Amino acid sequence: MRLNHPELIDLLKMAYSAEKAAAFAYQGHAGAVKNPEEKKAIYQIELDEWHHRKEVLRIMQQYNVSPSKYYEFRFHVVGKIISGGCYVIGWFMPFYFAGRLESGNVCEYFRMMHMFHSLGIKEHDKCLYEMGIKEKEHEVYFLEQIKTNKMLPFFEWLFSWGNKKGMNDVDLEKKYSIEESEKYCKK
């Protein structure tokens, strides 16, 4: 079956490649931190990103959607640059920007679900829901590490993410069920 939804096809291709960039970035992030517990947690997040990439590819293959060579190249380079940058930009910024990135990624998977629903396809709901929730867990982890840092208010003001501002409406304390999750990320 082929998908007749150009925006969904592009979002799948971009998500597939962006997961590689995120995994590369977390390799550098884990390598740059000194705390063994932080290192272990960031490594697990890297593994989650590789798993998401595999799941997105599985969905793409079902609809004969090939990865984008452009996105693969672009996100490969971006991921490697971020990975290297983690060694030179200090402790706070990798945690901050990882949390902000993850915050935006949450809705990526719920938007895919909405788009599949517009085509009458619900078979990917569980997978997309789980990936969206996992991205939210990543966001929460990174915010927890920096929530009391004196630089956070300035970065939150500048980049619109932090203790008071987020980029999604998912609340892990009051999660919707998979069946109700169409309510997420409607903005």
Image (cartoon, helix red, strand yellow):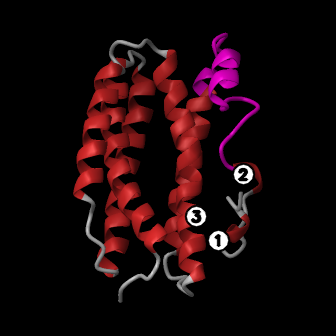
In the structure shown, which secondary structural element does the residue marked by tag 3 occupy? helix
The residue carrying pointer 3 sits among few (fewer than 14), some (14 to 19) or many (20 or more) residues within 10 Å by Cα, namely many
Quadrant housing the C terminus: bottom right
- In the picture, the disc for residue 111 is 3
In the structure shown, which secondary structural element does the residue marked by tag 2 occupy? loop
The residue carrying pointer 2 sits among few (fewer than 14), some (14 to 19) or many (20 or more) residues within 10 Å by Cα, namely some
Looking at the image, is 157 positioned above or below residue 72? above
As shown in the figure, which amino acid type bears the numbered disc 2? Asp
Q: Position of residue 37 (x, y in %)?
A: 44, 26
Looking at the image, is 34 positioned above or below residue 31? above
| Residue at the spot 31% in from the left edge and 66% down from the top edge | 57
The residue carrying pointer 1 sits among few (fewer than 14), some (14 to 19) or many (20 or more) residues within 10 Å by Cα, namely some
Quadrant in the picture for residue 133: bottom right
Determine the main secondary structure of the stretch shown in magenta. Answer: loop
Relative side of 147 to 101, left or right: right
- C-alpha gap between disc 3 and disc 2: 12 Å
Membership of 6 in magenta stretch: no
Quadrant in the picture for residue 25: top left
Looking at the image, is 32 positioned above or below residue 131? above
As shown in the figure, which amino acid type bears the numbered disc 3? Arg
Residue named by callout 1:
178
Q: Magenta residues, as a range?
A: 145-169
Q: Nearer the viewer, residue 28 or 177?
A: 28
Residue named by callout 2:
169
- Circles 3, 2 touching at the beta carbon (< 8 Å): no
Specify which label sits upstream in the sequence, 3 or 2.
3
| Residue at the spot 46% in from the left edge and 15% down from the top edge | 91
Q: Position of residue 127 (x, y in %)?
A: 49, 69
